[in-house]
Image (cartoon, helix red, strand yellow):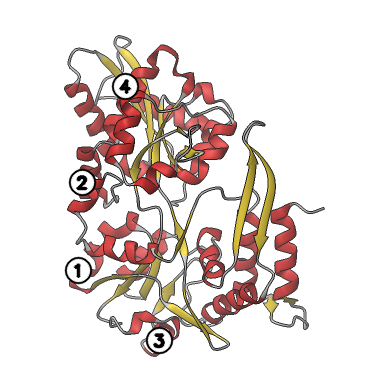
Amino acid sequence: MKKGIVSLLACGVLAAGAVAGFTGCQDKGLKLTVWGSAAQQETLKQMVAKFEAANPDTKYNIKVGICEEDMAVSNIAPDPSAAADVFCYSNDQLIPLLRVGALAKVGGTFLNDVKTDNVEESVKSCSIAYGTADEAVYGYPYASDNGYFMYYDKSVLSETDVTSLESIISVCESKNKKIGWAVDVPWYTAGWFFAFGCDYSVEYDYTDNYKETNIDISLNNEGGIKACKAMAKLAANKTVFAGKGTDNEKIITGFSTKQMAVGVSGTWIAKVMKEKLGENYGVCKLPTVTVDGDTRQLSSFKGYKLFGVNPHSGDRIVEAHKLAAFLSSESMQAERFEKHMVGPTNTAAANAISNDATFMALNAQNAFAKEQTSVPSSFWEPLKSVGLNIIDDLLSENGGGGKLSYADKLEAVEKQIKNIK
């Protein structure tokens, strides 16, 4: 879940200019627009050129612009008709995109290829009523790595050291090294709660614009309190914890300056981390943590990234599907891995990298991860406040002394998420 806010207007401007000098901005040709992440713009332009070369009988005028996968709803919802014909999105945004009418169904030979060529979970991630007669698929999977794991410096920590949070803290403390772990980012915060049995579920009325009809959340319990204690164990150790705003750039800088020895992030920084650490490049699943004698494997989110087709593309829609299918094909997924370490959903492309250390670490963590689908729309901000309060030392087990108890905080967060008045 890489962060990046790009306004709808910015997407339009970048789309018009990003491709200048590449495909050209002629008025002639079949016009299409495709949006992808900022980090992959050059690669996307090259893929568009290959698509054009593979279809010489059609003259295209394809413009490339920026829109991050996790910002698809923010950028598209204000006016889906003004959005790109093809755009990338993370699978947790499926329902919100459907709610604003921004996703076209995949059908015909395109649908057959999506189901045949990709791992089942990735197809399920962009489907409604999966596996039933009413099933509808709304995307072209291309990335299986929307999750996180742990990077570490092998010159500081051994494979044994990184198996538990307690040993990581002990070693880093003794060697004056920092740990980069974004406790204040709810995507990461959630994993601590999942580890101790907390969970959520959402029910929708699919006939009424995908309205959320019921949200169930379990945080205010023994497991939730233990999760808070576990996070506090890390946050309270100021000599090793990197603090608020531990984003990818801070982790990369921390390793570059040798100040940091452990960082939790995803594959999107793998290429640069390999360059920074060289032979000391270490990757593994998240560690265990022990609270009140209860040892748990820390959890995470896992998800997929997809190309969606805009149903407002009019007479361009078939060509838009053709472009989305090409950009998510086996060869393009293989190229994306080679250039950006993006994990494939295509079965053949995924098998080809099965022995890669980074993806072995991600897959090991995915065994303990929760699928990032049907996330309550009210989930993120309340959960973020828990991580911030823990970092700021505003919570404690029993409260008092100007602090709120874990139970009282979690009760308030549950009410916010469930929208209980």
Judge the density around disc 4: few (<14), some (14-19), many (≥20) Cα neighbours within 10 Å: many
Q: Of the residues shown, which amino acid type is indicated by label 2?
A: Ala
Q: How many discs mark residues in the rendered view?
A: 4
Which residue is labeled 1 in the image?
278
Residue holding disc 2? 348
Between the C-alphas of marks 4 and 3, the distance is: 52 Å
Identified at 48% across, 80% down, the residue is: 289
**Earlier along the polypeptide chain: callout 4 or callout 1?**
4
- Where is residue 167? Give x, y as percent: 40, 86
The one of 173 and 91 positioned closer to us in this rendering:
91
Q: Of helix, strand and loop, which one carries label 1?
A: helix
Judge from the rendering whether residue 177 lies leftward or rightward of residue 49; answer left or right.
right
Whether the residues at callouts 2 and 3 have beta carbons within 8 Å, the answer is: no
Read off the residue under disc 3.
167
Camera-near label (2 vs 3) is 2
Q: Is residue 255 above or below residue 58?
A: below
Q: Amino acid at mark 1?
A: Gly
> Along the polypeptide, which appears first: circle 2 or circle 3?
3
Mark 3 residue type: Ser
Question: Of discs 4 and 3, which sits in the foreground?
Answer: 3
The residues tagged by marks 2 and 4 sit, at their Cα atoms, a distance apart of: 28 Å
Label 4 vs 3, first from the N-terminus: 4
In this rendered view, identify the residue nearer to me: 115 or 324: 115
User: Which one is in front in this view, the residue at disc 2 or the one at disc 4?
Assistant: 2
**Label 4 sits on residue:** 62
Q: Is residue 155 left or right of residue 401?
A: left
Q: Residue at x 35, y 16 (%)?
A: 31
- Mark 1 nearby-residue class (10 Å; few <14, some 14–19, many ≥20): few
- Secondary structure beneath label 2: helix
Mark before the other along the chain sequence, 3 or 1: 3
